[in-house]
């Protein structure tokens, strides 16, 4: 099969590497245009572009997808199938219609749950115990196509979104391999999504970083670990905004107001939460300082118990 691969970030690069390692015939790679990065604001290649160049695969970076330019690029490559993984662009119907096997996608959720951006982070933030990856046929509307395969995995209680991302990235690449082999063999299933069960999620931003202490300890734990590596949960201490990286459950109850400090010492910073329970902050980062254990920070910066 002649494959045209479309993707941009690390998650997509893992799938492309799998195709390269398994000797698939990848005849072209589409990725987002180079973007300024870091303090120097120099144009940087996407992880997918870097991998394609290393393996002498032609790279295409159309600025627009609906002006006919991208269509002609894809058509000239005569693909049998399009593989799209976190490309960051919606493909128009004329491009989807080019390959005889259509276009397939790897999505980091158990569809139809969590269509859209940041499904990995929201699975953690919402306290889900199970998530996974799906392969599907692309349709006109985002993440609505027929499902081919899914693969499930449990989410660790203290697993960060970044850690889960790394696991799903590998799972997605493996599932893509299975999907392509079965499509080529003519045995891949095709199951319509139940659109009534669909849910949608959006990208994260720093506005959701502050911890809501009125929530339960588990909701707060999931918020802290779900917002890593970015944008990271925050809390107020001594009038400053601290980034919070670690927390644990306690067996303690309190009648203090949510958000009040119950105790600060060798174990960390115990804070009152919703339902009359408490939570122990174990790792944080003060403004302008390095990330450290909360107990170590307290050695030189005692905090008054409310």
Image (cartoon, helix red, strand yellow):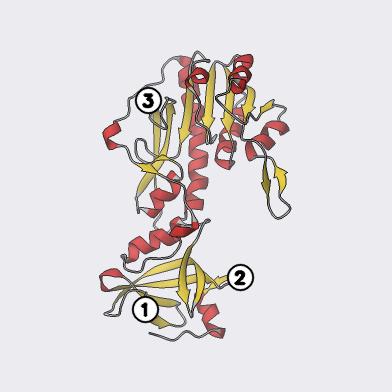
Q: CA distance from mark 2 to mark 3?
A: 47 Å
Q: Is residue 251 above or below residue 163?
A: below
Q: Is residue 209 above or below residue 98?
A: below
Q: Quadrant of the N terminus?
A: top right
Would residue 163 be found to the left or right of residue 150 on screen? right
Mark 2 nearby-residue class (10 Å; few <14, some 14–19, many ≥20)? few
Mark number for residue 84? Answer: none
Residue nearest the viewer, comparing 62 with 244: 62
**Mark 3 and mark 1 residues within 8 Å of each other at the beta carbon:** no
Residue annotated with mark 2: 290
Residue 137, position as x, y percentages in the image: 43, 24
Residue nearest the viewer, comparing 76 with 294: 76
Residue annotated with mark 3: 146
Mark nearer the N terminus (3 vs 1)? 3
Q: CA distance from mark 1 to mark 2?
A: 24 Å
Residue 218, position as x, y percentages in the image: 34, 62
Mark 1 nearby-residue class (10 Å; few <14, some 14–19, many ≥20)? some
Mark nearer the N terminus (2 vs 3)? 3
Q: Secondary structure at mark 3?
A: loop
Residue annotated with mark 1: 260
Q: CA distance from mark 3 to mark 1?
A: 49 Å
- Name which quarter of the figure residue 251 lies in: bottom left
Residue 265, position as x, y percentages in the image: 45, 83
Q: Secondary structure at mark 1?
A: loop
- In percent of the image, x 46 and y 42: which residue is there? 117
């Amino acid at each position: 099969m002649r494959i045209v691969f479309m993707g941009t970030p690390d998650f997509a690069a893992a799938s492309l590497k799998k195709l390269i390692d398994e000797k698939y015939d990848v005849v072209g790679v589409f990725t987002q245009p180079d973007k300024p990065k870091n303090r120097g604001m120099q144009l940087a290649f996407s992880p997918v572009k870097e991998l394609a160049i290393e393996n002498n695969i032609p790279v295409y970076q159309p600025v627009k997808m609906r002006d006919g330019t991208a269509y002609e690029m894809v058509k000239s490559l005569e693909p049998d199938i399009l593989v799209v993984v976190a490309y960051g662009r919606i493909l128009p119907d004329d491009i989807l219609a080019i390959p005889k096997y259509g276009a397939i996608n790897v999505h980091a959720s158990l569809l139809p749950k969590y269509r859209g951006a940041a499904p990995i982070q929201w699975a953690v933030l919402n306290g889900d115990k199970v998530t996974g990856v799906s392969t599907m046929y692309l349709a006109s509307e985002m993440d609505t196509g027929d499902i081919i395969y899914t693969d499930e995995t449990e989410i660790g209680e203290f697993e960060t979104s970044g850690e889960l991302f790394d696991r799903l990235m590998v799972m997605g690449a493996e599932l893509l391999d299975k999907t392509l082999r079965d499509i080529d063999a003519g045995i891949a299933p095709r199951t319509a999504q139940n659109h009534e069960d669909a849910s949608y999620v959006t990208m994260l931003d720093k506005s959701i970083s502050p911890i809501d202490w009125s929530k339960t300890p588990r909701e707060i734990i999931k918020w802290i670990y779900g917002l890593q590596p970015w944008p990271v949960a925050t809390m107020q201490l001594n009038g400053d905004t601290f980034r919070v990286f670690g927390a644990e459950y306690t067996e303690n109850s309190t009648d203090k107001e949510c958000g009040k400090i119950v105790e600060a010492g060798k174990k960390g910073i115990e804070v009152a939460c919703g339902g009359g329970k408490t939570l122990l902050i174990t790792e944080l980062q003060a403004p302008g300082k390095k990330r450290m254990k909360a107990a170590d920070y307290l050695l030189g910066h005692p905090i008054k118990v409310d």
